[in-house]
Amino acid sequence: MKKNKIAKLNEKVLFEFGMAEKVQQSQIFDIQAEAQEIKEGLDTLEKMQADIYAEGKDLISELEELLTIVESQELSNDTKKSIDEYFDDYLESVQNLTSSTTYDIRRTKEVVTNNNWEDYFDRVSQYTKEIGVDDNEDPFLSLLGEQEYRKLEEEVDTEFAKQTSIVNKTDLKFLAIAIALEVAKGLLFPVVAEKMGYGDSFNPDNRLDHNDKSIEKAHKEANDAYRDKKIEKNSTGKWMELLYQTVPYDITAGTGNIPEINLHGGAHRLYTLGHDPILGWVFGTANILTDVITISPGAVVQSDNKWAELVKLAGIRSYKVQRKPKMMILPERVSTFKMFKDSYDIAREHPMNLPAAVFTEGQHLKSDINTKMGLPVPILETFSPDFASKLYTNHYDALCFARDMKIVGKSAIVSIVMDMLISLVHGLYYNPQKDGTRDLYEVRTRKILLIANTIGTSSNLIFSYCTQNAKSLDIGGLLVTLSHLFLDTRFLLNVKKEFVESRIYEKIEKEIKELDKIEAELLKYGEKHRDLYK
């Protein structure tokens, strides 16, 4: 939106600008007072000149009479002396009268800028204190007056609402089309999503056993290929052991000696972070390097303690794993800090240790993901272990979650494409002469999209509630609607702020020009009459 240049001032500069204008006003008031005093002085001079002229006429008449007497008679020395004294008294009285008419014009203190902005406002602040001006007032109110400012604000709000209103034939047509498309999408989503298996669990019968020969063969071949590729440029070492040894988070032996945890046997993948499709790349890799197992909060055994749930949620724990004589979990707790520190130290021992551990983690996740138990929904078990357990036991795993996220993403993309088409076509109807700035017109476009998305999502929510079917909920459309609520609302407020500021600054600039004009006229008047008081 095109703004007046003065509207680009930041808040601090604007406030300082207001301070400067207050000083300017104070100086103008002083100049106006000077002008009034000058006018009164001129009136006094005119009156004094008239009085002096009248006295002068009487004096001239007396002098003419005196001269007539002097010319007709010879005067004694005493008489001549008295006449001289009389003239001396008269001249002294004229001199006293002249000195009494001297007029002292009061001048305001000059605030010098010295072409330095900070120095200028330091002087302004000092001057405002000297003349008793309150520099804490709102510069808007000091320039416009409170009532005028409130009135202007209301007028600008009304003007903005009028220019961004969608109550016209063109916008209402677009709104109707957009609502129809969004509602239709929300109602068709359950039908399309059902055909794509949205929200369905997997059938374990269609999956492989965890020890299936094909999985073991593929795993070994991948390890061999990686070893052969890397050994050409790297020496042998611990990294080769990491490729072929059993990962520490894949065992449950030893948990009987640790009463506070329970890995639930075959469901141990849910409760070990090494099996998490996302967190496993961090914790699983560290576990492989250090022979440690890290468990999730769901593995913490519940108790009757009122703080049990809180302790459970904070129950990410790590335990040491021994490999000989029998591979098992030891009761020895390992802090998360120590585990990562040891991982760092081991990674520095050989350049291939860390890459081999990451490769092993990836291969293990790959070998488990298509088995009957699958892998748990990522991250969920760390903050909602009960819900994660419910999903996992109902055969809803990471692959099901990935499939559903793709469906949600596709739904969101459809909503975004629809919004883009509506926005582009609506933009073709923009008329600069009629619709104002492009930003104001875009506010109308975004209002149409926001209303249409809100109605479409609301209809989908109502349909899901009435059918009591959570699978009918269009999460992708809901996310797009929420983005409109936040982003479009913020855009609308920013445009409105710029619009209001622009109008107010235009008014302020007009007031400033008027003040400058008055100041120039007063200075011109003062210069014109300055010679009278030298």
Image: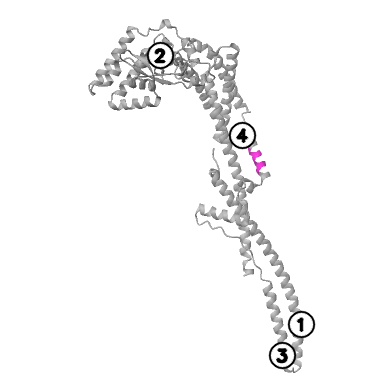
Label located before the other in sequence (4 or 1): 1
What's the CA distance linking mark 4 and mark 2? Answer: 74 Å
Report the colour scheme.
Answer: one colour
Tell me if label 1 and label 3 are in contact, CB under 8 Å: no
Secondary structure type for disc 4: helix
Q: Nearer the viewer, residue 350 or 63?
A: 350
What's the CA distance linking mark 4 and mark 1? Answer: 83 Å
Q: Residue under circle 1?
A: 61
Q: Residue under circle 4?
A: 163
Secondary structure type for disc 2: helix
Q: Residue under circle 2?
A: 257
Query: Does residue 164 show up magenta in the picture?
Result: no
Which x, y percent locates residue 82?
73, 88
Q: Quadrant of the N terminus?
A: top right
Which x, y percent locates residue 126?
57, 55
Taking the spot 71% from the left edge, 82% from the top edge, the residue there is 89
* Residue type at numbered disc 3: Lys
Which x, y percent locates residue 317?
42, 21
- Most extreme residue toward the top is 205
